[in-house]
Image: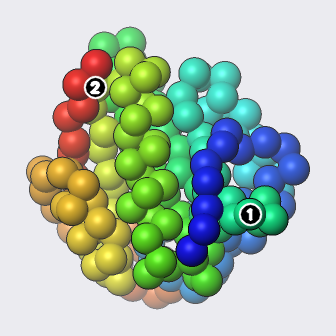
Amino acid sequence: MAHHFRDAIAVDDAALAEIYGHYVSTTVVTFDIVEVTPGIMTAKRVTVEESGLPFIVAVDDDERVLGYAAMFPWRPKAAYKQTVEGSIYLSPAATGQGVGGALLNELIERGRQAGIREIIAVISDDGADASIHLHKKLGFESIGHLTRVGFKFDRWVGTFLMQKSIDA
């Protein structure tokens, strides 16, 4: 699938909400449970931008958003400044086409350029096998498993923690 990357911009917010909203309403790969609006995505995107971290989109030749990836501060304390949580979501039509790996690689490179040293992935332990495989393929290591930490769709779900060190 032909695609390229760019920074996410305001015009993307509706597509970002649609992509993320799919996972919120149909899966436990995110623990968000409320409807995602373009306004919510605007707030997330602006917060990331203001923190100096990357928020990028993969788009096709017609500038349709295929997926997005972003880095969020891991914790608010100053000592965590160079550690982030990475997040990636693809439109259902873009899965299995190589977009996810390319998008995550681009996010890692942009994080490196921003001075990030450690990336943490927090991945649902239910229904996210493709994400786990992708992260392993790109050098993330398993660092832990938190069981029963989220309750969604009338069941308890845990998370796997994966981490990648990147050179500055």
Image quadrant for the C terminus? Answer: top left
Q: Position of residue 122 (x, y in %)?
A: 33, 55
Query: What is the secondary structure assignment of the residue under circle 1?
Result: loop
Residue name at image x 23 percent, y 25 percent: 167
Q: Amino acid at mark 2?
A: Arg
Q: Earlier in the sequence, mark 2 or mark 1?
A: 1
Residue name at image x 29 percent, y 66 percent: 134
Q: Position of residue 125 (x, y in %)?
A: 27, 74
What is the spatial separation of the Cα atoms under label 2 and label 1, in whole angstroms? Answer: 32 Å
Residue at which label 2 appears: 117
Q: Is residue 132 above or below residue 164?
A: below
Q: Amino acid at mark 1?
A: Asp
Residue at which label 1 appears: 61
User: Which of the numbered marks, if any, corresponds to residue 108?
Assistant: none
Residue sticking out furthest to the top: 78
Residue 137 occupies quadrant: bottom left
